[in-house]
Amino acid sequence: MSTKPTNPQDIPEVNLENESGTRAMEEALQSSFTILKIVIAVLVIYLLVFSNLVNVKQDAEGVIVLRFGKAQATSPEEVYKAGTRFAWPYPIDEKVEIIRNRPINSNVAWHAAIGLAERGDDIGQRPVDASRDGYAVTMDDKIIHIKAEMTYNVSDPSKFAFAFEEATAVLQLILDNGVTFAASRSDLATILENPTQFAENVKSRVVKLARDYDLGVEIERVNVGGDDVKLPFMTKKAYDKFSGVRTSVDEVLSSAKIAADGVRRAIESGGVGSGASSGDVATIRNKAKNEAEALRASVKSLASRFQDIVTKYPDPVARRRYTEQLYYEAMERIAENEDIKIYLVSKGGKLNRSKLRLMINQPPPEVSKEKEGGGK
């Protein structure tokens, strides 16, 4: 077998520049893969360690760590202890974070924000919309807008976190109920004039419900300020007029009380003083004194006359005859006077005998037909 000699011109040339570029690219890719592996390793370490670290602030928040669904620590001292907590990623561990103190606002009885400054209080421009506005009904069947703020403290983290699916939603319902319940037990004037006392009534109701539901919380305060109580716009004008009348009545009563106090002081001081009150008291006192003296003299004269009769007629029979004689003589003198009218009135009933009573210058009372017919 014969071989042909190789021609150097037939051998292909090798591009050394492409070979060096390929090697450089391979080295760059290897470096990129190395960097990517390092980044992935850092991310894994961060996810395993740093992302599961929780920093707990003292008395402000707490964390309960669940390991395979079981709580590791549930006492308030351990849950709220300041420091850093570590938990493995899910599904090994799970973190339940708790805010120890948080405010809750109730707007269930508040009106919708629709721009009072632009639309005013005209019922034509601002129609009543019960689907947007909330109301509370008072004990005297009045409607009112009320909003309140409640602050609570989680005293039992385990009950708060696991007894209910959403304990804060239950607290919201409790506060709404407290507002409407306290309004139904108070009249409108009391709520408007003393919102602080109304807030205490709301707190009493909220504390009772929180205890009944056993939420594991303590109610710290309920706040209802002066601006948190408002009349509905369609009743405000009428109530302002009513309040104006009530103010006038209070002023009249106050003036009457001052005058009464002045008269009382003048009486206690014997009418000595200055002003119209002391003069009126002195007049009334003098008139009463004169009438008392006249009555005293009349009684004294009558007693003296009776005493003379008893002395003159010691025998009861003789004394009776003498008094009957005086009676008849007096009746004769009365009968001779044409200006005097005499009425004989029958008095008596089913159990008492009928009696005739003499009434002088005083007409007898009218007898109804029922009494004349025996009460039928």
Image (spheres, rainbow, N blue to C red):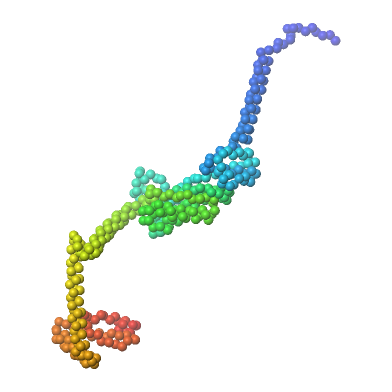
At 31% from the left and 56% from the top, the residue drawn is 242
Percent of width and height locating residue 263:
23, 63
Q: Quadrant for residue 254, please give it.
A: bottom left
At 60% from the left and 43% from the top, the residue drawn is 65
Q: Where is 296 relative to 31, above or below?
A: below
Q: Where is 37 relative to 236, above or below?
A: above
Q: Quadrant for residue 202, please give it.
A: bottom left
Percent of width and height locating residue 232:
37, 51
At 23% from the left and 61% from the top, the residue drawn is 262
Along the line of sight, the residue nearer the viewer: 50 or 263: 263
At 51% from the left and 42% from the top, the residue drawn is 60
Along the line of sight, the residue nearer the viewer: 146 or 123: 146
Q: Is residue 245 visible?
A: no
Percent of width and height locating residue 369:
30, 81
Along the line of sight, the residue nearer the viewer: 230 or 276: 276
Q: Where is 63 relative to 208, above or below?
A: above
Percent of width and height locating residue 113:
41, 45
Tell me: 71 left or right of 330: right
Along the line of sight, the residue nearer the viewer: 154 or 369: 154
Q: Is residue 159 visible?
A: yes
- Quadrant occupied by the N terminus: top right
- Quadrant occupied by the C terminus: bottom left
Q: Please state the total of marks drawn on the protein image.
A: 0
Residue extending farthest right: 1
Tell me: 77 left or right of 247: right
Tell me: 302 left or right of 151: left
Q: Where is 256 relative to 323, above or below?
A: above
